Amino acid sequence: MDGETLPQPDCEYIVVGSGPGGGTVAARLAEAGGSVILLEAGGDPRELQGGDPLKPETNRLPLDYDVPAFHAFASENEAIKWDFFVRHYSDESQQKLDWKYVREIDGGQAGGVLYPRAGTLGGCSAHNAQIFVYPDNADWQRIADITGDASWAPDHMRVLFEHLENCHHRPLRRWIGKLGLNPTQHGWAGWLHTEKAIPIAAVLKRDLFRTLRDCVEKELASSGHVVKRLGWFLESWGDPNDYRIVQDEQARVGVRYLPLTTRKHARMGSRERVLEAASKHANLKIQLHTLVSNVLFDAGNRAIGVEYLRGERLYRASPRANEEPGELRRLYASKEVILAGGAFNTPQLLMLSGIGPREELERYGIHVRVHLPGVGKNLQDRYEIAVVNRMNVPRWEVYEDVQFVPGDPQFREWQAFRSGIYATNGSVLSVFKRSPLSQGPPDLICMALLTKFQGYYPNYSQSLAKDLNYLTWVVLKAHTRNCAGEITLRSPDARDVPYVNFHYFAEGGDEDLKAVIDGIRFVRKLTSKLKESRAMVEECPGEEKQSDEDLASFVRRNAWGHHASCSCAIGPVLQSDFRVHGTQNLRVVDASVFPRIPGSFIASAVYMIGEKAGQVILNAWRG
Ligand SMILES: Cc1cc2nc3c(=O)[nH]c(=O)nc-3n(C[C@H](O)[C@H](O)[C@H](O)COP(=O)(O)OP(=O)(O)OC[C@H]3O[C@@H](n4cnc5c(N)ncnc54)[C@H](O)[C@@H]3O)c2cc1C
């Protein structure tokens, strides 16, 4: 475009990607009267047809999308999934020690571990586990400190949260809130519904009740400060998002329930947000099956539009990707281009557009518009690990007749009453804990799942429907120290998937390993009574692994993550108002913006920055 007369704009704002970042900002801009075109590479998950990988000819949509307990099937649904195969290590011999490593898939090279993403309307909010846990105040304070921008201070950010949330899991507080009393600082009238799903009848089944009771008893005994912790629990009723609890890092520990982003116990996320906004505001247009390949600039590095390929399944992370090249087209914006393709795709798109590390771009013959070495660097994630226990029964009582298919009794219960085990995301108990090395908020979230889950590998969801006598404790390490992950191009073709390497444990590895091992020992303690009574046996890592060395080696081999973030961070790549250094009218609004991975579950923070960006952009154009 350099030197050419600028074409007529098609809209004021182009937003690329409809996940929690892009969907949220697009809807806010449109509500304020802006004319917005939202471009999304995938289709609508409730309109598409797609089955699981073993039976691709069957159709499990829209129920894989709707039913909270089907989230694992959603993440493997052929119509919406984008499969990345990522490296945890460069060293091939270390990488191959992970049994989840896939060398080849469908006759092509994989060379990594499956990392599911959703290439569909709503982004990963279309397949995620719907857990909605408020970030830690320290996360926001860090950004305020780094940038000197006080609008990132925790209390400001909480106002944005109140604006977006429509909380239904504190019914009494909701009612009192209407009288103007709101010490929990929940939002009661926002667009994102949050609920809690506790299937009472299931919990009261003898086997599950006993298991949970024993674990909770052990948790109370092992953590001490029972009276104080009971006080905190009663203040919030186990709600981790109550602002009184969030403000006090000590008080965030203990047994907590996990709020879900559901409405009437069906999934909701940025898909619903943008469709509902578009139905009320004709100035929001959503264009699906549109893979953006390049940002267009004028001679002064001002973003003026995008180039894209029109067609279904063009991105090669899609199963059976389209062999046709797609139709090349352009769109122009008079005000801004906002990139929200997620932590893997936004850095890829920036690099394809000439913004990134010079050597990397030159290697692929891409004209360097802005030499920005931080693009694709600083990639971060959690470490997660599973302690898998097999119960001494053929299946949990709650799983009687369960098949995880439409039509089984649990499905009928969900359909008729929106209750029962399918209204949950499968997690029956969670404990927030601080590892001995943590100075701040809890850094270990331990979740009990009534299934066998050991991370992501092709067809992993099949285990959920098959292994019905397992209790898995997933240990999630939050506030990880490793910022060494990176995303680099494999080619200048926008349809190719970039190379992703997290370089696990490269930074702060010893501390993070110690914390994860502490988590493993802790969840083992929770089930010790059940093991003594032979109600269960530990299958993985296995009782023989007790020493620090054995457990560290187990964690190095088997850990995984699914909150990829920080790859276009505020600081090296972005200003505190999301603008890309060295350019004008170009912003990034998705999980890649954070300097450090926030909280324990990232989606809440991404929705919040979507709200914040909406405010910042509108203020900027109001002058
Ligand atoms: C299996 C799984 C379970 C998860 N569970 C939870 C959970 O329970 N709680 C939680 O807090 N977090 C969870 N997460 C993480 C969370 O959902 C994501 O971090 C979050 O959705 C990221 O939002 P985003 O806007 O950055 O990007 P995404 O959600 O990845 O959305 C990006 C969108 O951009 C589109 N796109 C990308 N490139 C282009 C392009 N070039 N042109 C056009 N469109 C493009 C993609 O198709 C996608 O729709 C989970 C993640 C996974 C993978």
Image (spheres, rainbow, N blue to C red):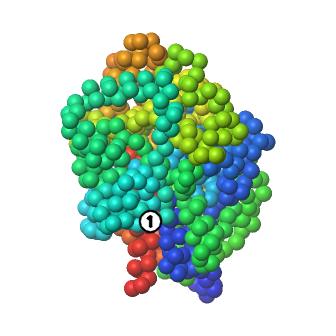
Which residue is at a point 56% across and 39% down the rendered structure image?
A: 420
Local SS, label 1: loop
Few, some or many residues within 10 Å of mark 1 (<14, 14–19, 20+): some
Q: Quadrant of the C terminus?
A: bottom left
In the image, what residue occupies the spot 52% across and 76% down? 31
What kind of residue is marked 1? Ala
Question: Which residue is tagged 1?
Answer: 189
- 552 relative to 106, above or below: above
Confirm or reject: label 1 Cβ below 8 Å from ligand 1. no
Query: Which quarter of the figure is the N terminus placed in?
Result: bottom right
Up the image or down, 225 lies above or below 160; here it is: above
Q: Position of residue 289 (x, y in %)?
A: 69, 62
Residue 223 position by quadrant: top left
Depth check: 548 or 200 in front?
Answer: 200
Q: Position of residue 556 (x, y in %)?
A: 43, 30
Residue 309 vertical position relative to residue 284 in the rendered view, above or below: above
Task: From the viewer's perspective, tell me whether residue 162 is left or right of residue 101.
Answer: left
Q: Is residue 361 visible?
A: no
Residue 515: image x %, image y %? 32, 33
Q: Residue at x 22, y 30 (%)?
A: 224
Left or right position of 415 against 15: right
What x and y, as percent, mark residue 337? 53, 73
Can residue 393 be spotted in the picture? yes
Count of marks overlaid on the render: 1
Residue 469: image quadrant is top right
Q: Residue at x 60, y 75 (%)?
A: 280
**Observer-nearest of 406 and 523:** 406
Q: Nearer the viewer, residue 176 or 480?
A: 176
Residue 274 found in image quarter: bottom right
Q: Is residue 591 left or right of residue 595?
A: right
